[in-house]
Image: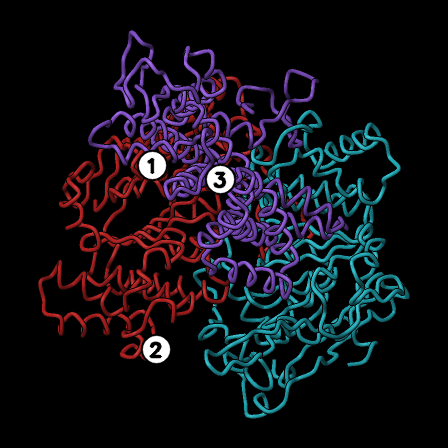
Chain colours: A red, B cyan, C purple
Amino acid sequence: MLLDIQNLTTRFATPEGEVFAVNDVSLQVEAGQCLGVVGESGSGKTQVFMSMMGLLAKNGRAEGTVNFNGRQILGLEAAELNRLRGVEFSMIFQDPMTSLNPYLRISKQMTEVLVEHRGITERDAAAKSIDMLKLVGIPEAEKRFRMYPHEFSGGMRQRAMIAMALICEPKLLIADEPTTALDVTVQAQILELIAGLGRKLNMATVLITHDLGVIAGLSDRVTVMYGGRVVEEASVTDVFHNPQHPYTRGLLESMPRLDTRSDQALHAIPGQPPDLQALPAGCSFAPRCFHAFDRCRQEIPRLRAIGGNRVKACHLEAMV
Amino acid sequence: MSDAAISRSGSGRKPILSVRGLKVYFPIVIGGLIRKTVPLKAVDEVSFDLYPGETLGVVGESGCGKSTLARGILQLLQPTSGSVVWLGDHIEGLPAAGMKKYREDMQIIFQDPLASLNPRMTIGDIIAEPLTVHRPELSSEERKQQVREIMEQVGLLPLMINRYPHEFSGGQCQRIGVARAMILRPKLIVCDEPVSALDVSIQAQIINLIKGLQDSFGLSLIFISHDLSIVRHISHRIMVLYLGNMMEMADKRILYEHPRHPYTRALISAVPLPDPELEKNKKRLVLEGDLPSPLSPPSGCVFRTRCPLAQDICAREKPTMTVVSATHQVACHFWQKS
Amino acid sequence: MKEASKPFKPDGLASIGTTEPVKGRSLWQDARRRLFHNKAAIGSMIVLGIIVLMAIFAPLLSPWAFDDPDWGYDFPGPPSIELKHWFGTDGNGRDLFVRTLFGARISLLVGVIATSVSLLIGVAYGATAGFIGGRTDNIMMRLVDILYSLPFMFFVILLMVVFGRNIFLIFVALGAVEWLTMARIVRGQALSVKKKEFIEAAHAVGVSNATIITRHIIPNVLGPVIVYMTLTIPQVILTESFLSFLGLGVQEPLTSWGVLISEGAKQMESAPWMLIFPAIFLAVTLFCFNFIGDGLRDALDPKDR
């Protein structure tokens, strides 16, 4: 197991009270595997990995265990984590501009990491960086290498971000909504790139997204999150063809899609996502669930195995 | 392009909105020492008709001018040229006072639900604002009554009338926006990316709401979105825009099943399908490169720099909208190739 | 709205136990709540309140008058509890405690009135320029730039010399200087509010320009204006003190903190109390206004939430 997160709980202290962002989340990623993490805003999908990376906001606190490659990394010293970030695992974000320094040339930002972590010369680092830019499909890599981030288009910036994230050949790449800010034609390019690189470098990837379509073609397994909890985890085929949690099914049925007839009415999930400051006593999804019964409103469902190498957190026996 | 090409022939109905050759340019000053003004052609030569009860979808990527088109139609931006005819009246370039009587009939829903509501006003006052402008004769009690009715229709509790926008979630804010647009019972609502800022599970609620209102009141809609699945779900007819230019316009079924323009085909093939097998086995038509700068669009066909079919003629001649069938037009020199 | 354990209604309506309309919490109320949680701001408001009350009720707090010397004491005399000269007397034998409080009257009055003058001119000018935009905005703001570049202090000094020292002249002169910055702030805010979607929504509904300014723009630019106002008051007080220090302030026997400090500074070595007490009052007041301004900024800025 490359990444093994057990019972992770992350909270944020705010003047208005405590925010329960991640609640008792466990998930695993195997080497070379692609895990899709699906959830809406406030589902805790990003904060799970921010906790793991040690990138929580100041008022955040994470508990539980995060095991990476046989090593417990949650709660490591900042300096210690710095040695791991970008080397053992990397993260890319929705808006590349927020993670690129606008005042430094791409060359400087890329070689810096290599020189610091790998201890190689500036010249070798430059050569390796240009190779990496070529690998992510940036045309005229030698020329672009000397440019500033603002001279890149949105798609090119995301490619540069990926190149920077991969420069030390990490074992795990975490991509947080990597294509949400991009147009659909560019999104296709970037998704193709991430999938291809994962195979080529035998690197595990975690794809965090709100768009079920994005992960369908790329991931091996899918984790669905809601209200800061994992509600279902299964292989990509099972999630899409035989969802066993009412939320997963609701999401699939509420999406208009190009591969079905278009005159079907959309089955919207009623109501609003839960308030993370005042989660319901029982299942967070119960107030919006068509199948909810009394137990759902009183008792938080635990993640349980339901056969076929899959788990769900729901009191319902099975869904047909 | 002939009028017949744009109108839906054989329908015999009269359009409520006719747009012909609409151009919206923004003057942009460039250069440091030697300055010059170049036009940014946000919308270039767009023509279409909209019929009562019909939904026209407008798709395109960011920067294709779809939001500018909406504002050019509603005269929130002054069109550079072209005509906008609402029920027989030319409304292009009308001053605010002249537009006032038409605004009752044409409303807009915005992309960012919270930003489109004044944070200092209660939602009751926000929803009632069109009434205070167009029905000043109503007493405040009558106005409140109408606000409560419309709130119920869009799925908001009338009890919430004295609350403020920041106390609502994104989906509820969008319902408030819909209520404000609907309170005067308009004939046309322009929806500018109304669900793209919302969570997936909420998007369907708002789409169903808009569709339901259309069915009950016979609204015409112009539905602008970058999401091809949503546009396909809600529209009758769809226009594809690229760099402010119309690429293709057709009935929904024809556009998705028999797209003629290479850009339309690339757009459709780029949409990820929520089905692992289909998605893995799909032959994707991935477009190379990025959108050119709208300040210096390519000569001839604006799509040619990314087009897999491009030839010399594409750089020389700008393709015009050609009639493929009564309900299908395309702007491509090589539409017959596909 | 907590609807967790309530029965489920599939139409998107949340059920709630009452039929009375729910009272909303406006952004102003939110800001007030946040301000009241800010200890420094609350403490400053209390201290400032005490100073204002002391200034108002000054004659009741001491047996001495502000303009009559105590012939039975030293000129200047050090603080003395039994004579009730708590702050001592000044070079003319007048009670410094009473004079400091009378100085507070003038200084605070100058601060409030001059700031109000700047507020009136600045908001009207700035909002107009910002909303109309384009050429008008350009011309109006270049005028502000030109006025900015003039050495205003010099003009104020000239005015004082020509028209004599007049307290109203000080109000007007200071207000006329301070409105420039206020206009710039309001104009910047109006420009950014003007681009918001809710303004476009108002246009789309057919709301007239005048109503858009009063109903949509001004309430949304008020936050920064209030903050800037609280920060302008100490600035004006300081400027008045500076004028007084130069000998161009209010006329004897009236006094202000600036005048008192100026006199105190001249006798710093022989009678330090003449400098220390007015200086403490001035410094504390400036501190208070700045803390309140900071507190307001934190309370009104939704980004800090």
Judged from the image, the secondary structure of the residue bearing numbered disc 3 is helix
Q: Earlier in the sequence, mark 3 or mark 2?
A: 2
Residue lying farthest to the top in this orientation: C82
Q: Residues within 10 Å of mark 2 (few under 14, many from 20)?
A: few
Depth-wise, is mark 1 or mark 3 nearer the camera? 1
Q: Determine which of the numbered discs, if any, sits on residue B49 in the image.
A: none
Q: Amino acid at mark 2?
A: Pro
Horizontal relation, residue C269 to residue C247: left or right: left
Q: Determine which of the numbered discs, if any, sits on residue A248 in the image.
A: 3
Residue highlighted by disc 2 = A139
- For the point 81% across and 58% down, the residue is B99
Q: Amino acid at mark 1?
A: Ser
Q: Which chain contains the residue that carries disc 2?
A: A
Q: Which chain contains the residue that carries disc 1?
A: C
x%, y% of residue B252?
A: 69, 63
Q: Give the CA distance from mark 1 to mark 3.
A: 76 Å
Please identify the quarter of the rendering in which residue B75 is found: bottom right
Task: Report the front residue among B241 and C138.
Answer: C138
Q: Determine which of the numbered discs, if any, sits on residue C262 in the image.
A: 1
**Mark 3–mark 2 contact, CB under 8 Å?**
no
